[in-house]
Image (cartoon, rainbow, N blue to C red):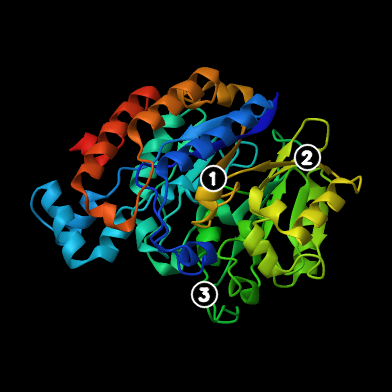
């Protein structure tokens, strides 16, 4: 049975802006109030999707959300018509309006945790939307995310969908940004690797002092139970708290893995040697040979990793046993990081090609190539059961490019979020998008 890893990238939404909402994400807070270009952001993301599809990788699209979120604003006491709700929020609580207008669903690494059928108790691909409880603007995402995922992966013979974990800090879950799977072959049992920032119920685990630890051990353990994973093929590791305090808000800012390879920084995990040893032992138990590529602090510091997003990259299997690493333009612009990448490619190791993309609009809000995609390992039969309208091809790329050019603004500032016309533009665009992607009614304005 043929199997592979597909990537589903988030389509940037019409309200893409820089409100600096994500404390702990250095790029997000550092670019607060910069004027954004939703159109450019969406086109940059689409260009990456199309390029990877053209290179032979399985590529899909995840739809953005309706913003501003009128239901969230109403829940917080703003009343009247939709336009009145926006006007009142803009006057009384502009920070809340900004939070309810965030286009953060573009970073679909946080959409859900996904376990492939080779690992699960019932032989289906399992999805659990992330509750993203650490940040208000993201905590409102999971109901719509769940509906979109179910519209994409509908066939219950192949796909199982769980509700998000309880919306409480003890079970803070940030999705696939803190989850990686290692395997010898995509259709064979693998080792699922969950990385957490803190333990909510066990004070023995250290915590960062400056920035929040968003993922809890308890959330990761709950997802492993929900997905029916075998204890002997799961590894839990804690992020280094000092590294979190330097701006590594998710594990995918400091490490990335695919197949049998982990590309990571020297300061990624607590008890790093023990973590790597456990991954090696458990992958060997299912016929895999674990390869760890560790980047020394002396060659690339944590601060340089955060600035360049070297590890917020994609590792893509080329089918010949080698991997391509997809990095943002910022990695090429930092001399020491680019020197390391050239050394890596020339080393004769498993990563032998680098591809660079301009993702500046996303990067300025703290999201690189890895943030923009949700990985789903599937068989041919499972891919055939996916809603075909969400799979990238020449025609879809042309349609979505024209859709963006028609509906998106060239410039958007924080002040523009008070414009009630923006909501109308967003709803008009998304209503058309659900028809393009054949999603049905997934947005609150369609369900009302």
Q: Where 372 sits versus 31, above or below? A: above
Residue at which label 3 appears: 211
Quadrant including the C terminus: top left
Asked if the residue at tag 2 contacts the one at tag 1, i.e. Cβ–Cβ closer than 8 Å, the answer is no
Secondary element type, mark 1: loop
Image location of residue 398, percent across then percent down: 48, 22
Secondary element under disc 3, as helix, strand or loop, is loop
Q: Locate residue 303, reporting x and y percent.
A: 67, 69
Residue that appears at 49% across and 56% down? 365
Disc on res. 40: none
Whole-number angstrom distance, CA of label 1 to CA of label 2: 19 Å
Give the number of the disc on residue 372: 1
Identify the residue shown where x is 38% and y is 66%: 168
Q: Nearer the viewer, residue 50 or 31?
A: 31
Q: Compared with residue 432, is residue 311 higher up or lower down, i.e. above or below?
A: below
Q: Earlier in the sequence, mark 3 or mark 2?
A: 3
Q: Mark on residue 323?
A: 2
- Mark 3 → mark 2, Cα distance in angstroms: 33 Å
Q: Is residue 322 left or right of residue 71?
A: right
> Do we see residue 232 in this rendering?
no
In primary-sequence order, the first of circles 1 and 2 is: 2
The crowd level at tag 1 (other Cα within 10 Å; few <14, some 14-19, many 20+) is many
Which secondary structure lies at badge 2?
A: strand
């Amino acid at each position: 049975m043929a199997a592979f890893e597909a990537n589903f990238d988030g389509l940037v939404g019409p309200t893409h802006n820089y409100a600096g909402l994500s404390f702990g994400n250095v790029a997000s807070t550092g670019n607060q109030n910069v004027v954004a270009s939703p159109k450019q952001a969406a086109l940059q993301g689409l260009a990456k999707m199309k390029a990877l599809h053209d290179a032979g990788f399985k590529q899909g699209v995840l739809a953005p959300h309706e913003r501003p979120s009128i239901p969230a604003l109403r829940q917080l006491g703003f009343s009247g018509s939709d336009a009145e709700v926006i006007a009142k929020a803009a006057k009384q609580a502009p920070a809340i309006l900004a939070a309810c207008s965030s286009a953060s669903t573009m970073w679909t690494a946080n959409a859900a945790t996904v376990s492939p059928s080779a690992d699960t108790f019932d032989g289906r691909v399992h999805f659990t939307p992330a509750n993203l409880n650490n940040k208000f603007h993201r905590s409102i995402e999971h109901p719509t995310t769940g509906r979109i995922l179910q519209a994409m992966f509908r066939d219950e013979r192949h796909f199982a969908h769980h509700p998000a974990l309880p919306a409480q800090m003890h079970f803070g879950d940030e999705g696939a940004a803190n989850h990686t799977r290692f395997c010898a072959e995509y259709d064979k049992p693998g080792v699922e690797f969950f990385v957490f920032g803190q333990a909510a119920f066990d004070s023995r685990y250290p915590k960062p002092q400056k920035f929040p630890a968003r993922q809890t051990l308890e959330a990761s353990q709950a997802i492993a139970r929900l997905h029916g994973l075998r204890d002997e093929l799961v590894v839990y590791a804690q992020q280094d708290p000092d590294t979190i305090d330097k701006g590594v808000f998710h594990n995918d800012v400091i490490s990335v893995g695919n197949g049998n390879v982990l590309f990571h920084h020297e300061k990624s995990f607590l008890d790093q040697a023990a973590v790597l040893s456990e991954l090696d032992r458990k992958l060997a138990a299912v016929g895999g040979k674990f390869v760890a590529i560790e980047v020394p602090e002396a060659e690339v510091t944590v601060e340089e990793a955060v600035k360049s997003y070297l590890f917020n990259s994609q590792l893509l299997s080329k089918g010949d046993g080698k991997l391509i690493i997809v990095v943002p333009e910022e990695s090429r612009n930092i001399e020491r990081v680019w020197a390391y990448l050239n050394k890596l490619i020339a080393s004769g190791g498993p990563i032998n090609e680098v591809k660079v993309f301009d993702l500046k609009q996303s990067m300025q809000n703290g999201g690189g190539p890895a943030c923009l995609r949700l990985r789903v390992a599937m068989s041919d039969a499972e891919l055939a059961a996916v809603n075909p309208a969400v799979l990238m091809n020449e025609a879809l790329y042309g349609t979505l490019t024209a859709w963006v050019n028609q509906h998106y603004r060239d410039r958007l500032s924080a002040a523009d979020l008070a414009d009630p016309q923006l909501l109308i533009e967003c709803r008009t665009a998304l209503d058309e998008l659900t028809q393009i992607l054949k999603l049905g009614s997934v947005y609150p304005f369609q369900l009302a």
